Amino acid sequence: MKLSDFDFDLPERLIAVRPAKPRTSAKLLVARGDQITDSTVADLGDVLRRGDVLVLNDTKVIPARLFGVRHRTGEFGLTAAKMDVTLLDPRADGTWGALVKPLKKVRDGEIIVFSDALQAEVVSRADGQAALLFNIKGDDFDAALNAVGAMPLPPYIAAKRPADDADKADYQTYWAKNAGAVAAPTASLHFDGDLLDTLTQMGVAFVHVTLHVGAGTFLPVKVDDVSQHKMHAEWGEVTAEAAAMIAAAKAEGRRVIPVGTTALRLVESAARSGQIKPWKGETDIFITPGFTFHVADALMTNFHLPKSTLMMLVSAMMGTERIKAIYTHAMRHDYRFFSYGDGSILFPSKDTSDVVRG
């Protein structure tokens, strides 16, 4: 497989920089085999059926974008440099991995001040990242971060506008619980309490799992031979309760539908033996055409970047040529793309009752 197999030309006007309001008013493309229906997220209940299980990622996005100042005393006296910091992941030694711009203007041992309450020492630098040790921890750290941090919007949005207070709500799922992500599981942004209540009343079940989405989700694929690409690792957990609920649904022939590629990657990581099991750790699973799905019978997801690993994932679910047709339809019908864009629900078979995966 070549990287060019997953490319397409997207009109700039279709890149969403704000979400639909209300959330459920977003368009929803329903693909069943070779059929496409145009709907809205508010009408998801017409697409699902009693007994379906939606797998939801309950990670919570932290306001990981920080702006600070580094002070230094040298031959020219006291100087200062503005620093743009994006937190990536907490490390076992108590530091945070972070992208620091401009990295060349900071040295190991220097302090970056973000507010009166929050500052961090640059412990080390390597591979384009820095290890930062903050002056406070626990609830104090969370409070200080929430006070001064901004949501880490994807590069294609950040290039068009800065994050603002609206993003702190818009870029967070309704059920966000476990803090640790620096990017949202964006298919889940379409849900609100009323939609969840409607689906519950019709007999749809929900299973929560956790995958902390990392900034690596936006890294471009730089090799033409897709098989040579190395995926970034992300931490996740499928609890015993979640695994049991999914296993029961599979045994009973009920459909299991991850909401978002993050939820899908996690449950398939936990089912590499062929059966879903409790699982905790880092996953770098890379899903490309030819992959055997053991859990997912369908997928609810947004529309993804050209030549991205997520385009490869949806191509694995539906077939490369079928995905090209689906994306062509979406562009012709003015669907909004990427993190704040519209959604789709992808069923690999025209008659979803006979889906057998893995």
Image (cartoon, grey):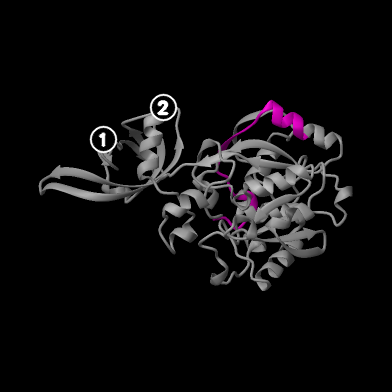
Q: Report the residue marked by disc 1.
A: 109
Q: Which residues are magenta?
A: 222-246
Visible residue check, residue 1: no
For the C terminus, the quadrant is top right
Residue in the foreground of this view, choosing between 210 and 193: 193
How busy is the neighbourhood of tag 1: few (under 14 within 10 Å), some, or many (20 plus)?
few
Residue 93 to residue 14: above or below: above
Q: Report the residue marked by disc 2.
A: 93
Q: Amino acid at mark 1?
A: Gly
Residue in the foreground of this view, choosing between 318 and 63: 63
On whether residue 227 falls in the magenta region, the answer is yes
Q: Earlier in the sequence, mark 1 or mark 2?
A: 2
| Residue 53 percent location from the top left of the image | 76, 41
Q: Rounded to the nearest whole Å, what is the CA distance between mark 1 and mark 2? A: 16 Å
Locate residue 356 relative to residue 19 in the image: left or right. Answer: right
On whether residue 199 falls in the magenta region, the answer is no
| Residue 138 percent location from the top left of the image | 41, 28
Locate residue 301 relative to residue 223 in the image: left or right. Answer: right
| Residue 40 percent location from the top left of the image | 70, 60
For the N terminus, the quadrant is bottom right
Q: Residue at horizontal 69%, vertical 28%?
A: 278
